[in-house]
């Protein structure tokens, strides 16, 4: 090999080795750069975890900073990843189906390179029922002009905010109430009495009733019928409490709504209507007779 060829070979070898070394160093720098700055800059703030009733827990939060296109939320329940949400969703409901069980929650903002170290965390206890139970019983019934006043007793109202009252013209079970087969109403407060509307058509009617406590989260006690009463309408009962001999509306399945009543016209009114009709017919016949004579 000539001296010129040898020198050329050495120059090329040294250049290739130096270039690979520089490229390797640049790659190392690039890796260090991305790993230290590519996790999300936005962070979680104002995190909240509260019981929502029916065993559910509601999680809400806000963000500090701006989330990038590839950023997302990761929700952890008891330190296990539970859900991944896109950046538009800043709330989550954990359905636990449990009562009185505590859960720890964490929400992070993450992307493919990692998570922001500022996260939201908290603990909440599930609430699925009225606890302690209200111990409702002792129903009494007082008949009023257009309604029946229901009153009841209870052994504990510490977790009662309202009452759920259900009624029907036939006996019913707890399952009937749970599946919305029965007419029910929620009272406006914790008072232990409430008026239910009578049927407005005449006859004897039976009213079966159940009462259950409801807590501030909407958990309610479901009970089958707990008592009943009968009442008799000698005449149709109107909404203002007066009586009428007309044909009253019909009401079924314990519904508190009813069709309107329509009274039969009195004899005097009926006679007036007949007289007007006869006069109209007579006038029409007279005009037709005059027309015939005019064009005869």
Image: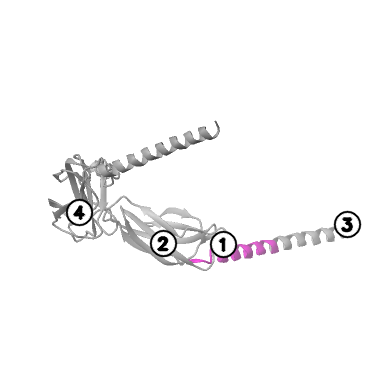
- Distance between the Cα atoms at labels 3 and 4? 117 Å
Looking at marks 2 and 4 on the same chain, the residue that comes earlier in the sequence is marked by 2
Lateral position of residue 51 relative to residue 153, left or right: right
- Distance between the Cα atoms at labels 2 and 3? 79 Å
Q: Are marks 3 and 4 in contact (CB under 8 Å)?
A: no
- Closer to viewer: mark 3 or mark 1: 1
The secondary structure type at the circle numbered 1 is: loop
Q: Are there few (<14), some (14-19), or many (20+) residues within 10 Å of tag 2?
A: some
- Distance between the Cα atoms at labels 4 and 1? 58 Å
- Classified by dominant secondary structure, the portion drawn in magenta counts as helix
Instruction: Say whether residue 29 is magenta.
Output: yes
Q: Which residue sits at x=53%, y=35%?
A: 294
Tell me which segment is drawn in magenta. Answer: 22-43
Rendering coords of residue 186 (x, y %): 26, 54
Rendering coords of residue 260 (x, y %): 30, 45
Q: Are marks 3 and 1 in contact (CB under 8 Å)?
A: no
Q: Which mark is residue 68?
A: 1
- Towards the viewer: 245 or 217: 245
Residue where numbered disc 4 is placed: 195
Lateral position of residue 251 relative to residue 291, left or right: left
Q: Which residue sits at x=43%, y=59%?
A: 91
Residue where numbered disc 2 is placed: 60
């Amino acid at each position: 090999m000539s001296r010129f060829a040898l020198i050329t070979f050495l120059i090329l070898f040294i250049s290739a080795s130096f270039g690979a070394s520089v490229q390797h160093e640049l790659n190392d720098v690039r890796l260090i750069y991305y790993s230290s700055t590519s996790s999300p800059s936005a962070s979680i703030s104002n995190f909240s975890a509260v019981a929502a009733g029916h065993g559910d827990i509601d999680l809400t939060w806000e963000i500090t900073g701006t989330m990038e296109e590839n950023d997302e939320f990761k929700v952890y329940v008891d330190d296990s990843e539970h859900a991944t949400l896109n950046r538009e969703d800043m709330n989550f409901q954990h359905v636990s189906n449990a009562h009185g069980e505590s859960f720890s929650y964490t929400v992070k903002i993450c992307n493919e390179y990692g998570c922001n170290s500022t996260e939201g965390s908290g603990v909440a206890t599930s609430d699925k029922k009225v606890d302690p139970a209200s111990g409702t019983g002792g129903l009494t019934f007082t008949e009023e002009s257009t309604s029946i006043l229901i009153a009841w007793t209870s052994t504990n109202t510490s977790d009662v905010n309202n009452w759920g009252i259900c009624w029907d013209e036939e006996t019913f079970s707890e399952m009937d109430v749970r599946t919305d087969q029965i007419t029910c109403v929620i009272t406006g407060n914790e008072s232990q009495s409430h008026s239910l509307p009578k049927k407005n058509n005449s006859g004897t009617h039976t009213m079966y009733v159940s009462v259950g406590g409801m807590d501030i989260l909407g958990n309610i006690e479901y009970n089958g019928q707990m008592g009943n009463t009968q009442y008799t309408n000698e005449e149709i009962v109107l909404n203002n409490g007066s009586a009428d001999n007309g044909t009253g509306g019909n009401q079924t399945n314990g519904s508190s709504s009813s069709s309107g009543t329509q009274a039969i016209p009195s004899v005097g009114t009926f006679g007036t209507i007949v007289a007007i009709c006869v006069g109209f017919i007579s006038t029409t016949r007279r005009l037709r007779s005059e027309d015939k004579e005019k064009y005869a």
